[in-house]
Image: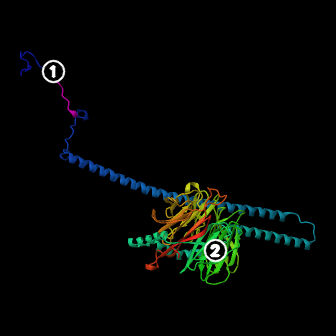
Amino acid sequence: NGGVDPFDASGTRRLDESNLVELQSAAAGNNGVAAPPRPPKATSLPSLLGMLQNEFDAVLLELYDTRKALEETRRELSSALYQNDAAVRVVARVVRERDEARGKLEEFLANDQRMEATVAAPPAVVEPQKRGREEEGADEDVAAKKAKTDGEESAEADLTKIPADELSAMNATWKKLSKGRKAIAKLKRSPEEIEKNEALLGALSEGNEKKVNLGKSSAKAGVLCMASVKSGDSEYVVTGGHDNTAIVYDVSSGKIVATLAGASGAVTAVHGMIVGDKMLVASGSLDGSIRVYSVTLNSDDEPSLLGNAKGSAEGTNPVEVTIHPSSTSDEARVLVASSEGSISLYKWSKSSGELDLLTRLEKEGAKLSSGCMHPDGLIYIAGTAEGELIVWDLKTQAVAGTLKGHDGNSIDCIAISENGYHVATSTASSPDSPVHVWDLRKLKLATTIATTDVGKVASVAFDPTASYLAYSGDGSAKVCVVKDWDRVVCTLNVPKSGGKKGKKEEEGLMGGIVWGGKGLSAEGEEKKVWLATGCDGQRPVRFWGVE
């Protein structure tokens, strides 16, 4: 246009490059690269929602993978910590053995130096024959003392280990029992069978309650411990109480079979086992003694005391006694948990006629309040007054693990399921304290069970099929479903006692609950179950499901 502004009416305004305005695009700040247009699928609201959903799904999938990797890392860490703990225990044992070997070496060198000094010393002025006799006598004294010292050291060392022949017998029993435990673990039931079993349990609370007074009526009221013993169609309940006796009661006939006396203190722990036509009964009492009796069944013969033994220290009381399943009519092995913190293995044999201490396993600083043996017979679990569970491996005589719970309160009762998977523990430190259930395979707390309206829980017990858990106190007894722990299928009401004069409210409560009958694994009409409970401060043993 000749360099003239076309919009100037006079045509005199000149234009040059200085009048040009530079235009900048929106992408000029991004190195001049223009933003790409939106894809066609992002131009509508449904398409945008679809894209957001895909992004959300991708984030969730990534989160799942991350959590899965975290869980695997946790398992690897747990395994590594367990291996480290095992390695620490092995190192501690090796260090202890090294120190013992050093001590014996130092003692040997000191004795050797004394012998050299004796040989180098000038002879005394004595007659030759007399001097010879004195030297011979001195040599005999040294040899006798050395033999005595070696014998004492050997005996002391033996108490930390189970003798090889005893361990062999226990291992043989473990192989037999583990097969039965695995069969229980594989037991499966149809929904119809489960419904019938729970209906059978529910009927216990609607049926008649049978009360049986065991023990002396003049003694202080209270059932302190209970055990159920079964062989074929014969069923017995063994109880202990304040009358210093253990009572063997035949559930089928409703008669007392034997009254086992001899203790000078209340009987706080009992256990029984039938071998042939006899029942072996072990009891522990507050006088610190352990007693083993033989009761002849289906006979009028008087029961006999096979042997008794005292605790390792004054004031030590047995808190739990268990006859090992490897016992026979000719020899009985008894595991005893004592309040001073030891797990002791005693043996009675027909040849010796004595109850001898074979092994004592101890954990420093532990004060035991309860105990229970694993169905296989090679694991023993002890509860402490500080709320710890100590898992002993009898095969290696070492602690396999320690668990803490119950807020540091005393663990007063322990029960292990027949399949060996779960351990239930309770404390009677306060009313409505929850029952803790532990997973023995993972050595961790699985769940806690609220015990509303039960009162102070005195005892816990799994049924023989490991399907139900019963727990009882001074208020009631309840049965819940294993793995569905909060579902209660049976409640048995027990009237509370009026209390015991002088008994402090914060003290624990003793008692027991046991299962009986054909069991829930029986078929058809044979399926029958009963429960029995006893409690300190209440005189009778209560039976539900027994005519």
Residue bearing mark 1? 19
Residue bearing mark 2? 247
Q: Quadrant of residue 143?
A: bottom right
Residue type at tag 1: Asn
Q: Give the alpha-carbon distance from disc 1 to disc 2, as whole Å.
A: 120 Å
413 to the left or right of 350: left
Magenta residue check for 254 = no
Magenta residue check for 23 = yes
In terms of depth relative to the viewer, which is nearer, 419 or 516? 516
Which residue is depicted at the point 46% across and 58% down?
76
* Callout 1 crowding tier (Cα within 10 Å): few <14, some 14–19, many ≥20: few
Q: Residue 158: percent from the left, percent from the top?
A: 67, 69
Q: Quadrant of residue 231?
A: bottom right
Which residue is depicted at the point 10% across and 17% down?
14
Task: Name the element at disc 2.
Answer: strand
In terms of depth relative to the viewer, which is nearer, 72 or 16? 72
* Callout 2 crowding tier (Cα within 10 Å): few <14, some 14–19, many ≥20: many
Residue type at tag 2: Ile
Which residue is at the far bottom?
A: 299
Task: Name the element at disc 1.
Answer: helix
Q: Mark 1 or mark 2: name the one nearer the start of the chain.
A: 1
Q: Main secondary structure of the magenta part?
A: loop
In terms of depth relative to the viewer, which is nearer, 449 or 64? 449
Q: Residue 464: percent from the left, percent from the top?
A: 50, 72
- Residue range highlighted in magenta: 20-26
Q: Residue 250: percent from the left, percent from the top?
A: 59, 78
